[in-house]
Structure formats: structure tokens, C-alpha cells
Image: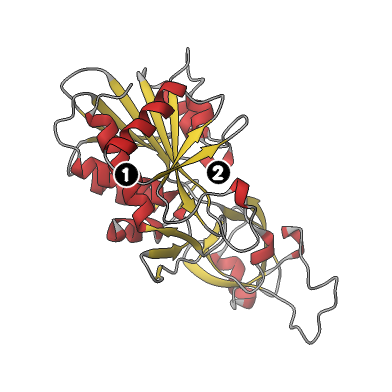
Amino acid sequence: MKETLKKLATAYDISHINEARQIAKEMLSKYAEVWEDNSGVFAKIKGKSDYTILLDAHIDEIGMVVTHITDDGFVKAAKAGGVDVRVLPASMVKIHGKEKINAICATMPPHLADKQSDIHSDIDELYFDTGLMEKAKDIIRVGDFITYKPDFIELQNGKISCKSLDNRAGCAVLANICEKLKNPPVTVIIMLSTAEELGCRGAKTGAYNFIPDECITIDVSYALSPGTPEHKCGKMGDGAMIGISPVLCKDISDKLIITAKKNNIKYQFEPMGGVTGTNADMISVSKTGVKTGLISIPLRYMHTPVETAALSDMEAVRDLIIKYVEAGGV
């Protein structure tokens, strides 16, 4: 799981930059029929019956797009997804121009900062320093994408930190499932969907291509850390977060809980009062409607360069889905 996650999380995937998708295709093609379209990467594992379970995780990441290049080589940008502006100053990024260029988000030295200049709430206030000076316009164009620079770090007790664990963690789980799921009783389609961070666009169009009997979306959700509200967070290390929501299929949620208990798989509840904010919302209303469940991986520091997750939680999600599929779904 760790090596799969490292390969996926350190690759880039935003709009027309599709490195992670190509890596995923290579991984999945060893074990299943694989294809790709504008909605994402797909893999089909033929089962003993035509009853079809769609397993979805989004493969795209948040980033920015270049909006202006100054004459002295500084770059301005706009958000492409939910970038946390608070953590950008002094962060390292990668600009995807004619070449991949390292850059640093400019920040005010503390000796010169006052209360106003030290706080940024709008990305339009920020500049990115490429070091290229007047040559920047030869390599970077308006419209080029910017992503966080990957730094895959192993913390203690099986914790991993890197950019884009939202949702390469879910993609790594599905890649692992594709490898381990042998001769299932039902047919499984894996969808690594695009553009979730821009409004669940890939899931909306990708799910429309199929008529699955049911679907489970895998995503990440808030993990408890200092300062976060306990009632809105899962706990890292406590296993798979099973979604409970009016927009999710109760039968699937209940079956996931039963399956976890039966197989001694660690799980926790994720109650939501309405929409989930994930691909599950779109897939559940595709065509005439799809019974949809949601399992999340607890994640700290979401939408930052240092998203952090526990391998044990990812393994719990993997094991739960495998046992669920082997039981034939709902």
C-alpha cells in the first residue's frame, strides 16, 4: 500500500496534466481490463454474475493556474480547487510550464511585517518567485498550472504525509483492491474519476456511462487534530469512516457496518445531515439513480502540502470493501 501511495501521490494530476492517471493505468492493467476517457481511468473485474458494483475514488488534486507574469519574473495565480491560502506563503510549488519549474510563494520577513501584511486571505495578494527574472515569460505562460511540490514523508506509527493524499489515498486503496480481488461473485468496475475538486465533474459524467447496481465512493474526511472540533472529525487509526447520510443508501451503510463487525475490521461512523460533499452526491443521482455508499479515510491537514493519513486506516477501508464485494453487495 505504501509504495502504491507514494507513486500516485508524488505524481501530478490536474486538468490536462495526467501523470497520476498514467501510473494508475499501468497498475490496474496488470489485473483487469482498463480504459480511459475524459472522466477518468476505469478497470473492470468480471465476476461470476453481471450484478455490478462501481467503486469510485477521485484522482485529481487541487492547484492553481497562472494569471499573470511580471517583468521581473514573479507569477500571480488563481485557485483551481480549494487551495488553503493560509499555508501558501513560503510554500514550495511546481509550475508546469514548458519545463517544470520550482517556485516559492513569496512571504514578508517577520522583521518587516505588520498585522495586516502578515495575514493573507486572498490568493490575489500573493506572488510566486521562480528565480527566472526576465526569462520567466519564455518558459511560463498564462494558463499554466501550479501544484504543490511533493515531499513524501514517513512519520511514526505508519503515518504518511504528502500532497494530494486527497484523494490518492483512495486511489491507492482501489489499486490494492484490484490486485487482491480474485474471481468475485459480482462484477466490479473501478473508476478513478477526474475533476472532483472542480465540482465532481468526472464522477457525474463517468457514472453516466454505466448502469451499476450500486456504488461505493472512497474519499477522505477530517481526522481529529489539535484545534479541530471533535464532533466533526474521525480519529486517525480508528479505521474506515462509514458514511451515514440521507443521500446515501441505508442498506449499503448497514451492510458495511455488519461486514466490518463480522470480519473484525476497525470502523467508525461519519454522520452527515445532508449532502456529503463527495462524488457520492453526483453518482447517487446519475440517470435514474444509483444506490450509493461512502467510506472515508481520516485525513489531517486537508488541502495543504502536508496532508497526513495512516496506512492502517487505508488497509481497513481496503479490507472492508473486499469483504463487502465478496459477500455480493446489498
Disc 1 is placed on an element classified as: loop
Label 2: how many Cα within 10 Å (few below 14, some 14–19, many 20+): many
| Residue tagged 2 | 197
Q: Pick the quarter of the image with the N terminus.
A: bottom left
Q: Is residue 242 above or below residue 15?
A: above
Amino acid tagged 2: Glu
In the shown orientation, is residue 129 left or right of residue 21? right
Amino acid tagged 1: Ile
**Residue displayed at 59% across by 78% down:** 131
Label 1: how many Cα within 10 Å (few below 14, some 14–19, many 20+): many
Tell which of 270 and 136 is nearer to you: 270
In the shown orientation, is residue 273 left or right of residue 151? right
| Residue tagged 1 | 265
User: Could you say which quadrant of the image residue 153 lies in?
Assistant: bottom left
Q: Is residue 123 above or below residue 181?
A: below
Residue 32 place in picture, x, y as percent:
20, 36
Q: Is residue 86 above or below residue 324?
A: below
Work out whether residue 68 can be spotted. no
